Image: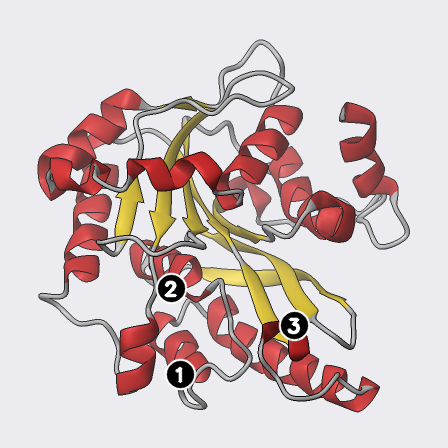
Amino acid sequence: MRRDLDGYFTADQGPKDTPPSPWARRLTGLVVPHIDFSRGGPCYAWGYRELSGALPVDRWIVLGTVHVPIARPFALTCKDFETPLGPAEVDREFLDALLTRVGPEYLDDEFAHRGEHSIEFQGVFLRHVTPADRPVRIVPILCGSCHRFVEERRLPTDGDAGEDFLAALRETLAALGGRSVLIASADLAHVGPQFGDPRPLTPGQSREVEEADRQMLLFVEAGDAGGFFRAVARDGDRRRICGLPPIYAVLRVLGGHRGRLLRYSQWPDPNGTVSFAALAWYGPE
């Protein structure tokens, strides 16, 4: 596995010898894919390359898309994540402080973590790029659907349960201190017959998907949560952006930190194309 993961950094589509950005020391967040490594490995590597220039991190707040229904906007877990390279341990101090604010009911959907890959893949990569003598401490948060808000063409607002949760997450980050980095484990478009479209994609349509994705990602780079949400919702999420909830959540928590697109990729298949990206956010000077 280590050989495979290292290979994504040196692959044709990987970062190779590209250094981390000049702002990597101020890294506060990442978008990385959750597509399987065999298709998205080099794009993961572009995101995790930034860590070679970042300051040491005390904990990783990993927000992943959940692919099954859950009762609340988010689902937490107390369970550590086993990886073939060693454990990614839940930061229990942080989790307990967060649960004090949001309530133990956010563990009711804990079992959704058991079969979900979006956070697991980040645990593997984080364990790989972290020295063996240092722990990997994570706060795993599965993000439920935003479909209701997309249908209503409106942003989640104060008083919505999801916004209350994100406010509590911001409060916990401020109260506990230390250095935290947020990760949005997020793929982008899902288009083609495999995902419900009537016909296979043409090369021209794939280019249209890329253009629309890149326009949407400009809002993510700008740290504009509302602009990003509206870019997805204005056509009813026609491209099925499955990373909408975690990216929006991280943007809301970071509160305007600006970012940089590191890599955009598609796994092209006329029957079902998936797009994904690596992007980093940086805090102020």
Residue 119 image offset from top left, x and y in percent: 49, 40
Residue 161 image offset from top left, x and y in percent: 15, 59
Q: What amino acid is found at the position of numbered circle 1 in the picture?
A: Ala
Of the image marks 2 and 1, the number of the one nearer the N terminus: 1
Q: Quadrant of residue 206?
A: bottom right
Q: Secondary structure at mark 2?
A: helix
Residue 154 image offset from top left, x and y in percent: 26, 83
From the viewer's perspective, tell me whether residue 120 is left or right of residue 44.
left
- Above or below: residue 129 compared with residue 186: above
Q: CA distance from mark 3 to mark 2?
A: 25 Å
From the viewer's perspective, tell me whether residue 86 is left or right of residue 171.
right
From the viewer's perspective, tell me whether residue 189 is left or right of residue 219.
right
- Above or below: residue 229 compared with residue 281: below
To which residue does mark 2 refer?
Answer: 248
Q: What amino acid is found at the position of numbered circle 2 in the picture?
A: Tyr
Of the image marks 3 and 2, the number of the one nearer the N terminus: 3
Q: Nearer the viewer, mark 3 or mark 2?
A: 3
Residue 214 image offset from top left, x and y in percent: 62, 77
Q: CA distance from mark 2 to mark 1?
A: 12 Å
| Rendered-image quadrant of the N terminus | top right
Q: Contact, CB < 8 Å: mark 2 with mark 1?
A: no
Query: Tag count in the figure?
Result: 3
To which residue does mark 3 refer?
Answer: 194
Q: Which mark is residue 233?
A: 1
Residue lying at 29% horizontally and 53% vertically, measured from the top left: 70
